[in-house]
Image (cartoon, rainbow, N blue to C red):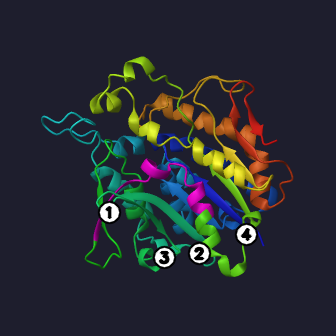
Amino acid sequence: MSKLILSLDGGGIRGAATTQFLAHVERELQDKASRSIRDCVDFYAGTSTGSIIALALATTNMSMEEINSLYNYETAQKIFTENKGLFEIDGINAPKFEAKDKTVVLKSKFGKAKIGNVPSGKHVLAVTYAIEKRKPMVIKSTKNSYLDLYSFQAADASSAAPTYFPTRELAIPPDSDEDFWLVDGGVIANNPTMCAISEAKRAWSSENINLSDLRVLSIGTGFMTRKINGPSSQKWGGLQWMTKGHILEVLSDERVVAYQAITIMDSGTYIRVNAKLMKQPGFDQAPDDAMDDISRTNIKRLKALGDFWFEQYGEAAVALLLGTYEGKSLDRVDPKTGKPIVQP
């Protein structure tokens, strides 16, 4: 029996496009088959903002509409509360945003949900990075030591983007004396698809699940188009790479993983929902590519991006979730045509 992986990229407020797309998918599933995303997904994977969505779907009772409503102007203003420290230059010698309100929002929405609350037979993972250990830390339901961890704590750690939010301290297991200092998993796997594929094969090894038995719906948050000045970069040091080169965004580019996934997956078993954040056929007003542009206009444009994605991928994505898709694998939108690239 095949298994369906839902993999969700990081990208800060750009997760608004992801949730808008999934809200459309949820309605279509209910109208066509009286089913939900939760009925169809076997393995949830997320990084950063994607982990918030994945953990909400996997471990809480929040509806897809409720999850989508998290990405609104009012909530964004709370999460992205600017650091007002004296003599602190936000993002340079201190995090750009405070952590307190982000934690409060996540805790209020997730409540007492834990990693172990994922339904029987299903799994979830959230990607983080342990800075003191200098190693990736994938918080996952397939490992007992993570099961009692609160979901809001995992989401908070996975979305603690360096320079944007402070590092998060977690005791793992929760009742142990071993503390881990965690940052946003986007520094090592902003696109968690390969993590999910690897973990899914391990989780269901007793069922002899092979790569050909997996289906993957992988959703990005749009990728950047703003130019980085090549000639000037020859003279940059650390400060310039952070302020002018946007080094965090460079390091979290998701396209290598997207290439790996579409290459190893069987044709017709993989759909990658993503697009350049630029004007293209069928989409006239591109959102800002910044992960922290929480203006009303930008959030509205991000939601419109989710609408555009549903127009382009919706039918195929719903069929993939239902196990009835018969087309070829789909990649990101070609900005010249405004249509998904079809795998040869």
Per the model, the C-alpha gap separating discs 1 and 2 is 31 Å
Q: Which residue is mark 4?
A: 210
Q: Quick check: is 310 in the magenta stretch? A: no
Closer to the chain start, of discs 4 and 3, is: 3
Image quadrant where residue 57 sits: bottom right
Closer to the chain start, of discs 3 and 1, is: 1
Per the model, the C-alpha gap separating discs 4 and 3 is 21 Å
Q: Looking at the rendering, in which quadrant would you find the C terminus?
A: top right
Of labels 4 and 2, the one closer to you: 4
Q: Quick check: is 195 in the magenta stretch? A: yes
What type is the residue that disc 4 sits on? Asn
Residue at figure coordinates x 87%, y 53% from the top left: 326
Per the model, the C-alpha gap separating discs 4 and 1 is 32 Å
What type is the residue that disc 3 sits on? Lys
Specify start and end residues of the magenta stretch as a single range: 179-197
> Badges 3 and 1: C-beta atoms under 8 Å apart?
no
Per the model, the C-alpha gap separating discs 3 and 2 is 15 Å
